[in-house]
Image: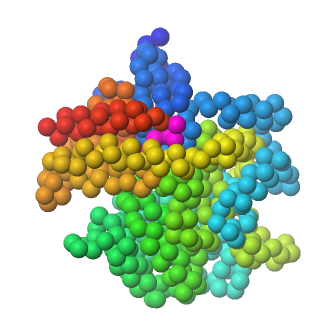
Amino acid sequence: MPNSPLVERDLKVLWHPCTQMHDHPAVPLIPVRRAHGVWLEDFEGRRYLDAISSWWVNLFGHAHPAINEAVRRQLSEFEHVLLAGFTHEPAISLSEQLVALAPPGLTRCFFGDNGSSAVEIALKMSLHYWRNVGQPQRTEFVTVAHSYHGETVGALSVSDVGLYKAPYEPLLFKAYVAPSPDCRLRETGMNCAQHAGRALAGMKEILARHAKTVCAVIVEPLVQCAGGMRMHDPAYIKGLRALCDEFGVHLIADEIAVGFGRTGTLFACEQAAIRPDFLLLGKGLTGGYLPLSVCLTTDTVYEAFFADYSTGKAFLHSHSYTGNALACAAALATLEIFAQGDWIASNRGLAAVMGDALGALRDHPHVASIRQTGMIAALDLVADKATGQAYPGRERRGLAVYRYGLEHEALLRPLGDTLYLMPPYVIQEDEIRKVVEVMAAAIDQATA
């Protein structure tokens, strides 16, 4: 069966995410027939190496037999029940395991459907906490420049990527924006830790002025992904925890994209040896199978809501599919795969191969800022390497890379002119080298 009949049907009824639909059919849709490991296959038998883990969600490859079996086993019992007034083994076991794995002191799990939902939960929970403890004047939040936390109204309000945010400004609440610790922004002669210190000074200025009305600071630890794979030193997260303690505000760590081994440790916060007040997880939580997210928090926060119903202190937030049993089963199977092997150590070896392969591009006249944190690597296409001058956005050089990749068995979906690799952990060394070769050839063609 050819691809075209499905594409024709699709374009009559579907509206795709993060897509200018006018680009189709000039940029053909790829209907997937099957997927296994790191490979996707279309209806015409062409294969595509999923170098971006299908938007950062897939950890152990597509159609993993252990996760498949766990979902089948749960499906034979029941698919979903409400988590208000009822409970079930998969949600309990998953919560127990997450509490055991997370930084000590994070003892309570509140489930959501997706990453944006987890952000909304944390924002509401923080604001409501301060109200419950007698500080209702705390209604504001601080975010970091170039951050991205999701597409729902609250999550977008604490984001700082204009491409996603600007059209919806009338819907959003204002957040204070602190300087980014992005190491690429450091001054000559300054290392990444020193630049982190400078960014922290800017954060401190905001908190010094507004701490009495601020609920929380929200941050993506180590890598600001959708904002252009901006990477920073762990010293920033460590210093941010200290500032939040100094000024008495919550710290929300959004690890939805960077959790579960992406940065070289199970959780990015481990590299700073800190515990946030809220830890947000999603994407890889279910191994890429089903939508599920979680907001972990402390007993201190939980106890501020634990009171007689008449006090009005209950956290009346809900999602119909909160704690979905099938998703929890997939997540438990994912954690079991982690437990059965030293995937963090294995990833260090794969990350070294990735870094070595990308090293061949360091002298490319149109490649700048090759950077890497664990299993996330990125670079920027530039018109002038010496000055760092970007290409005009209308030229869409990154799109040219994407199209070349599809023609040569690689799914590379850049963020504008930022190219990146974030593959599943089952990728082989030869596959890493192959996809970097395709990327290099794509860059040559896109910048010719």
Percent x, y of residue 229: 38, 55
Depth check: give the residue in front, 206 or 264.
264
Q: Is residue 352 above or below residue 121?
A: above
Callout count: 0
**Is residue 129 in sight in this rendering?**
yes
Question: At which x and y percent is residue 147?
Answer: 42, 63
Q: Quadrant of the C terminus?
A: top left
Task: Tell me the quarter of the picture where residue 68 sits.
Answer: top right
Part of the protein shown in magenta: 420-426
Q: Is residue 218 visible?
A: no
Where's residue 226, x and y in %? Answer: 41, 54
Q: Does the magenta run of residues contain 154?
A: no
Residue 20 located left or right of residue 253: left
Examine the image and state in which quarter residue 186 appears: bottom left
> Magenta: predominant secondary structure element?
loop
Residue at 43 percent of width and 59 percent of height: 223
Q: Tell me what residue is drawn at x 47 percent, y 50 percent.
A: 348
